[in-house]
Amino acid sequence: MIEYLLRLALLLPLLGGLIWGSLWLTRWLQTRLHGAAGAATGRHLQLVETSLIAPGMKLAVVRFHDREILLGCTRQGMVRLGEALATNTSEPE
């Protein structure tokens, strides 16, 4: 019984550290790969807004080359529903 408690006392903090480390590494890699690098390369596609209509169905507005495009997104795919000139081309804060 004592051996079991010693193993538990050793492995639980180790497991917690591994979980915390993997979460930290994932967050660090996401900001590194998509955060500053995306802004520095001048990406042309930007997600403006999404709205959930029903389970599995969304409306999304994306900005692409000074145009805002309304997309209908389902589990089967995406459909372009409309397009307009972008009213505000500044980056969101």
Image (tube, rainbow, N blue to C red):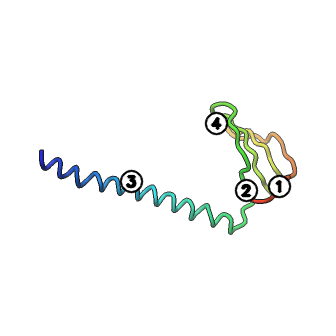
Label 2, label 3: how many angstroms apart (C-alpha)? Answer: 32 Å
Q: Amino acid at mark 3?
A: Ile
Give the residue number, with chain letter if any, for mark 4.
75
Disc 3 vs disc 4: which is toward the camera?
3
Give the residue number, with chain letter if any, for mark 1.
88
Local crowd size for mark 1, using a 10 Å CA cut-off: few (<14), some (14–19), many (≥20)? few
Identified at 78% across, 53% down, the residue is 63
Label 2, label 4: how many angstroms apart (C-alpha)? Answer: 28 Å
Q: Residue furthest right?
A: 85
Disc 2 vs disc 4: which is toward the camera?
2
Residue 19 vs 77, above or below: the answer is: below
Q: Is residue 24 left or right of residue 47?
A: left
Spot occupied by residue 34 in the image (x, y as percentages of width and height):
61, 61
Local crowd size for mark 3, using a 10 Å CA cut-off: few (<14), some (14–19), many (≥20)? few
Secondary element under disc 3, as helix, strand or loop, is: helix
Give the residue number, with chain letter if any, for mark 3.
19
Disc 1 vs disc 4: which is toward the camera?
1
Q: Is residue 34 left or right of residue 41?
A: left
